[in-house]
Image (cartoon, coloured by chain):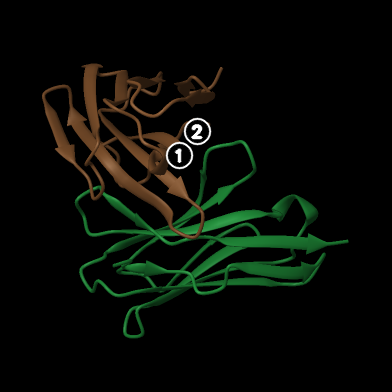
Chain colours: A green, B brown
Amino acid sequence: DQQVKQNSPSLSVQEGRISILNCDYTNSMFDYFLWYKKYPAEGPTFLISISSIKDKNEDGRFTVFLNKSAKHLSLHIVPSQPGDSAVYFCAASENDYKLSFGAGTTVTVRA
Amino acid sequence: DADVTQTPRNRITKTGKRIMLECSQTKGHDRMYWYRQDPGLGLRLIYYSFDVKDINKGEISDGYSVSRQAQAKFSLSLESAIPNQTALYFCATSDSTQRMGDTQYFGPGTRLTVL
C-alpha cells in the first residue's frame, strides 16, 4: 500500500504561470519530505526538501509547503519555465533513511 | 564525471538468465540503495546498505540479491530473470554524516528488459 500518493499524474501549465504539485501521505511518522525532478533517460535529481518542524521552505523559484495536520505537501514553481518540464516525485522519510516515493507527476510547460 | 554511475545503461536478456547491475559512486557516501521504477508506481526500494557489512531488504527484494563489494560499489543481481522484472533500475547514495542525511543522490538508471 503506497504511503505517499501523487493523485495527479500530469499537469500542463503555461510558461510564466505557477505550477502547483500536490502530494498526500498516510504515515504520521514521516518527518522529512523531499521533491525530486526527473528528465527522460536520467536519474531523479534532488530539488528541495522540508523538515516536519517547518511548514515552508523556499529555494529560488521553488517553494514547498507542508500541512502536517492534513498530511499534505505541495510544491510551487513560480514562474514556470520550459526547462521545468519533467516528472516530479514526492518522497518521505521517517528518520530511517529509507525513502517512500509517490508515483510522480509529469509537468509540461507550454510556451 | 558523474558522481553515481551505473552499468550497463541498457540490457536485454532472456527469462532464466542471471544478470548483474553495477553501481559505483565517487561521492564518498556510506549508504547505498537500489530501486526499481515501474509506470504508475514510482520508485520502490529493493535493497539498501548502510555500510559494507550492513545489507537490508527493502519492500520488494524477492528475486533479487545484492553485494556491497566496497564502500563505493553496490551491485544488484537477478539470479533467474523473469519478464515482470522488466523495469528501470536506479542506484542511489546518501551520507549519514550530513544533517539532511535522508537526501539521496541517484545514478542515471539501467533499463532492463527481460524477454
Foreground residue among A99 and B100: A99
Give the answer, above or below, for where B43 lies relative to B67: below
On the image, the x and y values in percent for residue B52 come to 17, 22
Q: Identify which residue is drawn at 63% across, 60% down.
A: A106
Q: Identify which residue is drawn at 47% across, 22% down.
A: B5
Q: Which quadrant of the figure has residue B48?
A: top left
Q: Secondary structure at mark 2?
A: strand
Q: Is residue A38 left or right of residue A51?
A: right
Residue B101 seen anywhere in this rendered image of the structure: no
List the residue tagged with mark 1. Answer: B86
Foreground residue among B73 and A56: B73
List the residue tagged with mark 2. Answer: B113
On the image, the x and y values in percent for residue B28 come to 33, 22
Q: Secondary structure at mark 1?
A: loop
- Work out how far the residue at label 1 is from the one at label 2, CA to CA, in angstroms: 5 Å
Residue A100 seen anywhere in this rendered image of the structure: yes
Q: Quadrant of the N terminus of chain B?
A: top right
Q: Residues within 10 Å of mark 2 (few under 14, many from 20)?
A: some
Q: Is residue B6 left or right of residue B96?
A: right
Q: In which chain is the residue bearing label 2?
A: B
Q: Which quadrant of the figure has residue B27?
A: top left
Give the answer, above or below, for where A60 lies relative to A56: above
Q: Which one is earlier in the sequence, the residue at label 1 or at label 2? A: 1
* Residue type beneath disc 1: Thr
